[in-house]
Amino acid sequence: MDLTRRKVLALGTSTFAMASLTGLPAFASLTDDAIAAITGGAEITEGGIELTAPEIAENGNTVPVEVAAAGAVEIALFASGNPTPAVATFKFGPLAGSRSGSTRIRLAKTQDVVAIAKMEDGSFHKASATVKVTIGGCGG
């Protein structure tokens, strides 16, 4: 094979590109890792938490989300398709009047929004909702 400067540059560039892409973690695994960090690997039960999010968001820049869980000491929100999946964490003390929170989040694309609640007894509950985004909010 005749190696020219052009071929060496093309080969080097493609090798660098492949090496860079293989080092990127998938967004879903980032979400799983963040959830595991909160739960410590404990079992998560479906239900026991209310998650309210729109089915369709016309603009991903401001998507309203509400969560509520009776008896929760902490509720964490995750957007599985975002580059940084951890969106918000609500912490409640023993004198909290209601164990709920609401916020507006930014979603890059159509994805699942996941809420994990840590209860007073140490158990964890999960709820999720799929939000279809027509205009992305994270540069999309």
Image (spheres, grey):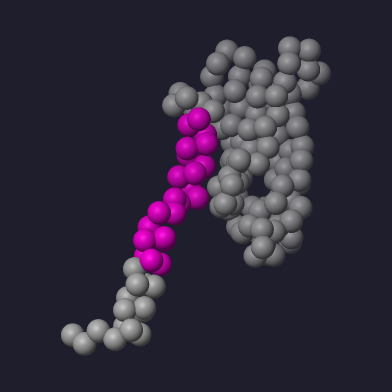
Q: Look at the image and say whether residue 23 sits in the magenta stretch.
A: yes
In this rendered view, identify the residue nearer to me: 46 or 35.
35
- Residue 46 in the image: state x and y as whole percent: 53, 31
Q: Main secondary structure of the magenta part?
A: helix
Query: Can residue 112 be spotted in the picture?
Result: no
Q: Look at the image and say whether residue 36 sits in the magenta stretch.
A: yes
Q: Quadrant of residue 86?
A: top right
Instruction: Determine the residue located farthest toward the front in the rendered image.
Output: 5
Q: Residue at x 57, y 51 (%)?
A: 83
Q: Is residue 135 above or below residue 87?
A: below
- Give the magenta part as a residue range: 16-37
Q: Residue at x 74, y 61 (%)?
A: 58
For residue 48, side relative to residue 33 (left or right): right
Q: Residue at x 77, y 37 (%)?
A: 102
For residue 46, side relative to residue 95 (left or right): left
Q: Is residue 12 above or below residue 131?
A: below
Q: Is residue 77 above or below residue 73?
A: below
Question: Quadrant where the C terminus lies?
Answer: bottom right
- Residue 97 in the image: state x and y as whole percent: 81, 18
Query: Can residue 81 be spotted in the picture?
Result: yes
In this rendered view, identify the residue nearer to me: 46 or 123.
123
Question: Quadrant where the N terminus lies?
Answer: bottom left
Q: Residue at x 67, y 32 (%)?
A: 89
